[in-house]
Each structure stands twice: as structure tokens, then as C-alpha cells.
Image (tube, helix red, strand yellow):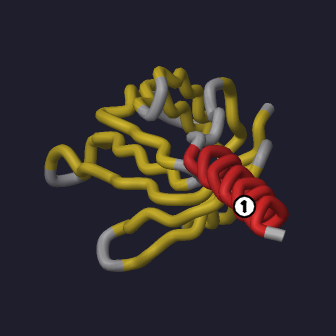
Amino acid sequence: MKNKIVALCSIMLLVLVFGMVAQAQDAKVAGTWTMTNQGRNGVVTTTLTLTQNGATLAGTMKGEAGPEIKLDSGTVAGKAITFTVTRQGRNGDVKVEYKGTVDGDTMKGSFMQGQNPVDWTAKRS
């Protein structure tokens, strides 16, 4: 009886450990993504190109109009993604932080435009 209890506890411990390891792995986001958000004049489409080195992200964003801009920084932790870009605003540089979650070949999140949150979604191209 004691051996069965020890064996059962060992199996449960292994299942917990493997579950924690699987959950701790960072999402794989390298590649090209088509990102959309609602703008003043309708849907805004942006091409997001990411490279990934572990939890660190780099890449570029290119809107329908305007120059391609480099990400200032970016990270992925599990399914959480965060990256920032600096855009040229009317009164100088404006840093924009994008936060979201990754679910396979889709992402969704938000960023602040002034005092207003803007939702975004992205699909792997």
C-alpha cells in the first residue's frame, strides 16, 4: 500500500512539473504579423515584423502611410507580449507601448493614444 501511495505521489509531482515547464515557455512570435486597430477614419493596418532571441524582441512596424520604424524594445513572457516604438508626433517624439497576449497565430492587446486606450489585433502573415 505504501509503495502505491509513493508511486501515485511521484506521478502527480511529474505532471505538475511538466505542466509548469510547458506554461513557462515563451510564445514564439518571430515573423511577420498583420496588425489592425480602429483609427479616426476607419481600420488602420500595420505590418509588424518581429525577431526573437529568447524573451527579447526586436523588429519594425510599417503602417499604410509613413516610414518603417524600429521597435525601441520588446519582450515576451509566456503569452504576454510588450513592445514600444517612438513615433514622430506634432510636438516631437511620442513613445507608444503596446501590450497584449499571444495565442498561437493571433495576438490582441491595447496601446494608449493620448488618454484613450486603443485595442489592436494581429494575425501571423
Rendered-image quadrant of the C terminus: top right
Image x and y of residue 3, in percent? 79, 59
User: Which residue has dot 1 on it?
Assistant: 6
Image coordinates for residue 91, horizontal then vertical, percent:
15, 53
Q: Is residue 54 visible?
A: yes
Q: Is residue 117 above or below residue 74?
A: below
| Amino acid at dot 1 | Val
Q: Nearer the viewer, residue 39 or 35?
A: 35
In the picture as drawn, the residue positioned furthest to the front comes out as: 1
Question: In percent of the image, x 56 and y 48: which residue is there?
Answer: 24
Q: Nearer the viewer, residue 1 or 68?
A: 1
- Up/down of 115 relative to 77, above or below: below
Label 1 packing within 10 angstroms: few (<14), some (14-19), many (20+): few
Q: Residue 111, relative to residue 83: is it above or below?
A: below
Q: Residue at x 62, y 26 (%)?
A: 30
Secondary structure under tag 1 reads: helix
